[in-house]
Image (tube, rainbow, N blue to C red):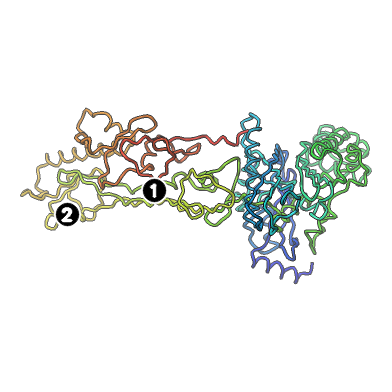
């Protein structure tokens, strides 16, 4: 690459904020790739790779988040240094371990022929996805695992019953779509997001590794052919099949390069790194040299090493072939092998043998990378680049189906789908807490002023505001593809703040005492304080008998105890429900001043608010016993058997149910 041209293009890309940063987080290594889209191609500007120092991942699943994050940060920082920029967003792909797929179909019909726009296509695909989720939920096993929808592909569109590759801007009365939805266990997806957060990166797009790899290795212009792409990594072998212009299926083999490495470790007593090197040396060396874990050096002919791994090697090739046949139904027209495992000696011959194909129909991927990606500095034909290139190409050239996205406050939200989602689900997935829905008034200051109880109120909180597509909704509102959610969190009111100067009338400053003591006028009063202003008394406060001060101090302590009792939700309820033995502030409350509710089947009595404002449903959450810091489920609100909202006004006699619903929709 010419230095001047390269720097200019990099600078332009940085200014336009159109850099595409992809991370391929593999079992053996992490590959980072940065490019910019120009002239409908991804121009690769920088690539970096680092292997894990120890086995931090197994079968494509992150096991040691800290270790993986450490390696990812090294890759990111080297790329930033090379490009002289800061990378904030990243595109990633999830591995196919425990991958599950579900096919579904959706059809829409109109009264008359009309132009098919992006909104119609989005609703059509979203309808198919919802059906796929419903079918998947019925077929899940009982292992207790939760699965997320991580991607889908449209296998076929129909326009007035005729197959068509793209519906956009065509005219018709009936349209339909067949899709394949892909689901992964929640731990696979969540660990990926957690790792990226530790590297100060925000996930801009998420796809599946076989989808990414096929987008790089098998461009759309040759997908009319029946082709298979096998990305052989260290932990898994991801497989994707194309036919009739579309991707028609995905699967994975649970064996990959690590099985061969482990066979060498067991046979020659070597560590993992040494076994990896031995595996690769078979290709280019007649004799393999190594040192075992006992410190003894060895030199063995490569044929001996081949014999050692022959069993594992054949198992790998047979498993890959059987998976291809199970998805495709028969041998495809051609097979492309990608990933580090594709470099194993004789793997083309072995796969062709098990598929009963001509060996010339099994190729190493790489020759088609140039259709969508180019570079003036890097040789992109390396089959190891299939996944990182595919991730970047998929995101940069808009190959990722995203009709199911939801916008939250103007930004694409993280959307881990596992069935129908409510607005509350979306808020919880994107960093909000239950407390953000509740507006709490500032704390009151309750004192005794000249023998009378006096309350100074904190300011009321500002309720949260929740809208979907411009309309006010409840948190239980179901979210649909393309919805625009606007959420303004609730804000608490300010605590009451009152000083002695605020309540003392002129001329009584020198007579006023707080808890039996003369204090400065700027003293801030606290709940439980006893204030005597001396108003109406001829005896100055400083000349009052000591016994009077002692009495007032005792009164202050009693008031403090009463206020503390009122501050506890359970105590406040008990005081009203059960007649206290000792005098209490609410002892003489008349029934007309009490609101009676039935909360979760139990009676609850509350004194009417002094400002005569009604109780809201949010006011009763604190009496439910639910820990809003760690709810452990979906908060459900009902009033008289109907779904309620936090801002809903209550009437005396209402039946309220506040409980947690465990989110087990996606459990497998």
For residue 295, what is the image quadrant? Answer: top right
Mark yes or no: residue 78 visible: no
Mark yes or no: residue 492 visible: yes
Q: Few, some or many C-alpha atoms within 10 Å of disc 1 (few <14, some 14-19, many ≥20)?
A: many
Disc 1 is placed on an element classified as: loop
Q: Earlier in the sequence, mark 2 or mark 1?
A: 1
Q: Residue 42's x, y, as percent?
A: 74, 61
Disc 2 is placed on an element classified as: loop
Q: Which residue is depicted at the point 7% across and 48% down? A: 537
Front position in the image: 16 or 136 = 136
Q: Few, some or many C-alpha atoms within 10 Å of disc 2 (few <14, some 14-19, many ≥20)?
A: some
Q: In the visual, does 591 lie left or right of 317? A: left
Q: Residue 226's x, y, as percent?
A: 84, 46
For the N terminus, the image quarter is bottom right
Q: Residue 117's x, y, as percent?
A: 65, 57
Front position in the image: 649 or 301 = 649
Q: Which residue is depicted at the point 13% across and 58% down? A: 506
Residue annotated with mark 2: 504
- Eye-nearest disc, 2 or 1: 1
Q: Residue 62's x, y, as percent?
A: 67, 41
Q: Which residue is depicted at the point 39% across and 39% down? A: 621
Q: CA distance from mark 2 to mark 1?
A: 32 Å
Residue annotated with mark 1: 439
For the C terminus, the image quarter is top right
Count of numbered labels shown in the rendering: 2
For residue 144, what is the image quadrant? Answer: top right
Front position in the image: 626 or 653 = 653
């Amino acid at each position: 690459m010419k230095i001047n041209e390269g720097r200019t293009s990099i600078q332009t890309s940085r200014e336009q904020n159109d850099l595409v940063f992809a991370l391929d987080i593999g079992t053996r290594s992490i590959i980072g790739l940065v490019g910019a889209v120009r002239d409908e191609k991804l121009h690769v500007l920088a690539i970096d790779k680092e292997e894990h120092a120890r086995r931090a991942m197994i079968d494509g699943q992150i096991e040691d988040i800290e270790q993986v994050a450490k390696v990812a940060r090294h890759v990111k920082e080297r790329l930033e240094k090379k490009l002289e920029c800061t990378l904030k967003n990243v595109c990633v792909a999830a591995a196919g371990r425990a991958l599950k797929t579900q096919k579904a179909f959706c059809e829409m019909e109109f009264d008359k022929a009309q132009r098919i726009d992006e909104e119609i296509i989005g609703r059509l695909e979203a309808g198919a996805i919802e059906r796929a989720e419903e079918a998947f939920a019925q077929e899940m096993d009982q292992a207790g695992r939760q699965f997320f929808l991580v991607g889908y592909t449209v296998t076929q569109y129909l326009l007035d019953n005729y197959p068509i590759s793209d519906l956009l801007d065509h005219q018709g009365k009936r349209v339909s779509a067949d899709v394949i939805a892909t689901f992964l266990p929640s731990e696979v997806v969540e660990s990926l997001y957690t790792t990226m957060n530790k590297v100060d990166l925000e996930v801009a797009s998420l796809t599946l590794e076989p989808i990414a790899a096929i987008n790089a290795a098998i461009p759309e212009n040759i997908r009319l052919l029946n082709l298979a792409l096998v990305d052989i990594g260290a932990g898994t072998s991801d497989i994707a099949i194309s036919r009739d212009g579309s991707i028609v299926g995905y699967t994975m083999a649970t064996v990959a390069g690590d099985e061969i490495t482990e066979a060498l470790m067991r046979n020659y007593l070597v560590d993992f790194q040494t076994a990896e090197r031995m595996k690769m040396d078979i290709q280019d060396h007649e004799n393999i040299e190594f040192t075992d874990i006992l410190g003894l050096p060895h030199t063995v002919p490569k044929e001996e090493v081949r014999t050692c791994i022959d069993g594992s090697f054949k198992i790998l090739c047979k498993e890959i072939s059987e998976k291809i046949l199970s998805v495709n139904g028969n041998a495809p027209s051609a097979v492309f092998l990608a990933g580090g495992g594709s470099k194993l000696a004789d793997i083309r011959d072995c796969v062709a043998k098990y598929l009963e194909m001509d060996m010339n129909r099994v190729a190493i991927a790489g020759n088609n990378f140039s259709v969508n990606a180019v570079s003036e500095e890097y040789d992109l034909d390396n089959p190891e680049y299939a996944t990182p290139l595919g991730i970047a190409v998929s995101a940069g050239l808009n190959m990722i189906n995203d009709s199911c996205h939801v916008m939250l406050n103007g930004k694409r939200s993280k959307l881990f789908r596992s069935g129908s989602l409510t607005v509350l689900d979306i808020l919880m997935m994107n960093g909000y807490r239950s407390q953000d829905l509740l507006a709490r008034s500032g704390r009151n200051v309750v004192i005794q002023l000249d023998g009378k109880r006096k309350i100074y109120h904190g300011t009321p909180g500002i309720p949260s505001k929740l809208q979907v597509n411009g309309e006010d909704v409840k948190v239980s509102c179901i979210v649909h593809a393309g919805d625009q959610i606007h959420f303004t969190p609730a804000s608490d009111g300010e605590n009451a703040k009152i000083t002695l100067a605020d309540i003392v009338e002129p001329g009584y400053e020198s007579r006023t005492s707080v808890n039996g003591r003369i204090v400065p006028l700027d003293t801030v009063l606290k709940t439980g304080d006893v204030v005597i202003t001396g108003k109406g008394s001829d005896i100055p406060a400083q000349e009052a008998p000591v016994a009077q001060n002692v009495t007032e101090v005792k009164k202050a302590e009693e008031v403090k105890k009463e206020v503390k009792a009122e501050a506890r939700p359970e105590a406040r309820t008990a005081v009203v429900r059960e007649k206290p033995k000792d005098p209490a502030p609410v002892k003489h409350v008349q029934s007309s001043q009490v609101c009676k509710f039935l909360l979760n089947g139990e009676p609850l009595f509350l004194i009417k608010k002094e400002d005569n404002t009604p109780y809201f449903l949010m006011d009763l959450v604190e009496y439910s016993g639910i820990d809003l810091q760690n709810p452990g489920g979906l908060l459900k609100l009902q009033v008289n058997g109907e779904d309620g909202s936090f801002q809903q006004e209550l009437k005396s006699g209402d039946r309220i149910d506040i409980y947690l619903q465990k989110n087990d929709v996606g459990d497998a």
